Structures are given as C-alpha cells and as structure tokens.
Amino acid sequence: MPLYELTAHALHEKLKAREITAQELTEAVYERIAEVEPHVKGYLTLTKDIALEQASRADEGFQNGDEMPPLAGIPIAIKDVICTKNVRTTCGSKILENFVPPYNATVMTKLHAQGVVMVGKTNMDEFAMGSSTENSAYQITHNPWDLDTIPGGSSGGSAAVVSADTAVCSLGSDTGGSIRQPAALCGVVGMKPTYGRVSRYGLVAFASSLDQIGPFTKDVTDCALLLNAICGSDARDATSVDAPVPDFTQCLINDVEGLKIGVPKEYFTPALDADIADNVHAAIAVLEGLGATVEEVSLPHTEYAIATYYIIAPAEASANLARYDGVRYGYRNENPEDLISMYKKTRSEGFGEEVKRRIMLGTFALSAGYQDAYYKKAQKVRTLIKSDFDAAFEKVDVIATPTSPTPAFKIGERTADPLQMYLSDVMTTPASHAGLPGISIPCGLVKSGLPVGLQLLGAPFAEENVLRVAYTFEQNTEHHQQKPQIQTNGVG
C-alpha cells in the first residue's frame, strides 16, 4: 500500500520504527498531489519548502530516539480560513487574495508543537459560505469519488484532499455543517467538536457564535489524535471553554453494550434520499446488533433550524465582514472618487455573489424595525432547538442521523437555486445551533457508488461517547476502507 494511503497512527509506527522517514512520506504525498491534484483541485496554496523543512526536523527527532508526538512528521492540510504565519490565507475570496497573516492561529501553534508537516492550504467556499465549494473565487474542487460532482462545503477542499490521499489528514471549520457534510460526501471521517472546545483565535470569522475548527481523517483513531492536539482553552478566545480535555484515544473502545442511541423521527422524512435512508438504518442496526439500545426520539423544532440558521449566521457575517473595507488590508479598488466610493467599489469587486447575498440578508435582519422580528426571534428558536436536544440527551447517550439528505450532486446543479443549496445542510445545522459535538463517518454507498455518511451527535463536551460509538461501528464494518478510484481521463 502506498504511504499516502496509510492512516496517521499507522505512519507514526513506521516512523518510530524508522522503517520510513518523514521526508520520504512527504515526497510521496507531493507525488500523489502531482498525479491527481490537477483533477481534484483541492489546494489553493502548496507549501512544499516549508513541508520538507518540517519533515527534516521530525526525522532528526526520530533518528535521535526522542519521544515524538503521534502527529510528528505527518502531512496535514489546512483550510484556507485558518491563519498561517507567513503563508497566504485567502478564505477563498478575492478580497484577501494577497493577505499573508503575521501570526498563527492557536490550532496552528498547537500543531507545530506536535511537529506536523503542513502540505498546503485547501480550497473552500468564500468565507466558508456555501455547501459545495463552488463559491470559491479561485476554482471548483471536484469530489474524488466522481469528478463531475461537488465535494460538499464549505470545507470541500479539506475533505477532498483526505479522500484523494493528497494529505493524510486536514483541518476544516464547521459553522452549519461545513466539516460533517463534506466528510459524508467524500467518504471520510469529519468531526465538529463542542462549541468552545477548540480555540477560534486565528480562524477568520464567519458566524462567531457557530464557527468551530475540527479534523478530517481516514479513520476515527486519527480523529481522536487530532482532537488531542487542537482542543483546550485559550485566553485569546473569549468563547473558549476552560474545561479539562481528556485523552480522546482512551475512549476508542470497541464496545457499545448498554449505550442508548436515539434516532430522531424528524430526520427521516420523504425528502431524504431512499438509498441514504437504507444505509443509515443498516448502520444503526449494526450498532443495535453490537449491544446498543436504539429508541426513537423527537426533536420537534428541527424543521425551523435552516430558517433560523440563515438569519443568525448572515447577521453575524454582516458584522464580521464589515472589516473588509480596503483601508487596512486586503483588496482595494484602485480608482475611487472618494472614501465612500472606495468602500463600495472595494466590497462590490472583492466579494463574490453568495457573500454579498448573505451580507445583505444579515444587514436587513439587524436593521432598525426588523431586528426584533428576525434576529431576536431566531435566537429564541435557537434556544428551543437546543432544549429539544437537552431533553433527548436525558434519555439517550448519542443521537444517530444521516449527515446529508442526498449524496454528492453534480457541479452546477444547484448554483442557480440558493434555497436548494441551503437545504444541503438540513441535517447538520440543528446541532450547530445547540453547540453539540458531531461526527460523520462512512456507512456505505448509494447505488451510483457515492459515499453515505452516518452522523453521530453527543451532548455538550461528550465527545467521548460520540467517538466510542463511531469507533465501534468502524471496527465492525469496512466502509472506511473503501477508496475512490479517481478517473482522470478528460477531466482537468
């Protein structure tokens, strides 16, 4: 098996035994990138010089017999919404085309302390606004399972590079499903930790009360390793929670005996793709066969989650994106008549259509006379959605649902219909409102051969329950071992 197909924990054992070097591993990943990246288009920036230097440092440690962290020498890709010191960070937007941060995000500081190898920055929907990675100002990322389909979004690049083996693992961000949905569509593991579990310092803000950084990996063990690396409180993020961080690898127990799994009836509607419903029901049956108790639960306010999300998230985006005015950094129109003209032209030319749509939606929802009717009401509904989950978690340990209502759809299929695009996140936004931890793991294929994701949700800070159930399912099935066969003929 080629090195780039192996998991991080398998590679760590080889590096520790000095069967391979981090330099060899990094070179193997870049060879894979040269082979398939022109077709997948998952990266916006490659950092090969930095990567080889980091690999060399990791090799020194292994050769000296040092006690090396589990992610030392492992090639990782970073979503281009996370600030990387001295490395371009565009957020998929023209307005930040030449922005080079002078500092690292907290998660990057933590990963560098682990000795990781940064392969590059991945493509994304502009400012993380989208469900298909078609809103990037630079390129459309293709799903490795079918290059004519989307990889999901907004972290589509981060999901696609793990699926295509052009990175061993990656980081993304999840506001309303932007890790879980692309993980499902690309057949990889993707996890959104509890809101506040991972520092948002250095994560370029979209919707501050929803944004959370999390990992994409090839299996659940790697997910636990990355969570160990990035979780923890941070004084530079006021929403970071000062709670103890367990060793998540300790909850990788192949046993669900006695655990209660809730299945919400509201997630299994006639609108759900029949193939996906069959695969998810089969996955739940596997867990039941392994000793878990399965019972139906109700989350009655689920139907309002999307409408609520598209008031709260654009409102927060409207405020957060006000800073891009052409004055301090980023794109600036070269021929303004005056200051107001510079603001207007800079923002009109620098932002893409979807970002402008959401800024206008959010500004309207916050405007005088409408804030109570829209934004405040949405916040009240958000509280009701959270209360639904609180009540459910008094009865069950984990909630199991589909991650996406459909498999990956064709590129261009929904770009003219924003509402259909927004509904791509119907299964993931409720947990985002409640700040819950959630994981998507591969649980099968639809008849056309595209992957299906099983979403497992836990109570706040109950990542251990989620990982335990995910790990048990993975150990007793082979879905995570299925790989896309990238057909490169005629696609570029």
Image (cartoon, grey):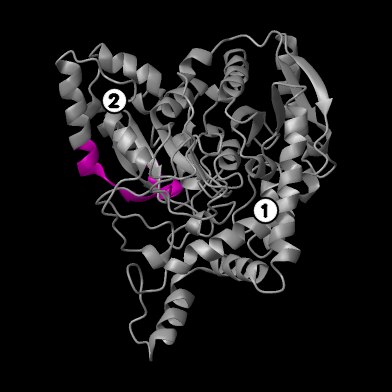
Residue 164 appears at what percent x and percent y?
A: 45, 37
Residue 138 visible in rendering? yes
Identity of the residue drawn at 54% across and 33% down: 191
Question: Mark 2 Cα within 10 Å, few/some/many (few <14, many 20+)?
Answer: many
Residue 239 appears at what percent x and percent y?
A: 49, 43
**Quadrant of res 341:** bottom left
Please identify the dominant SS of the magenta region: helix
Q: Are marks 1 and 2 in contact (CB under 8 Å)?
A: no
Identity of the residue drawn at 60% across and 28% down: 442
User: How many numbered marks does the figure carry?
Assistant: 2
Of residues 236 and 488, the one nearer the viewer is 236
**Quadrant of res 33:** top left
**Compared to 8, does 96 lie above or below?**
below
- Residue stretch rendered in magenta on the structure: 34-52
Nearest to the eye among marks 1 and 2: give it. Answer: 1
Q: Amino acid at mark 2?
A: Ala
Task: Name the residue beneath numbered marker 1.
Answer: 309
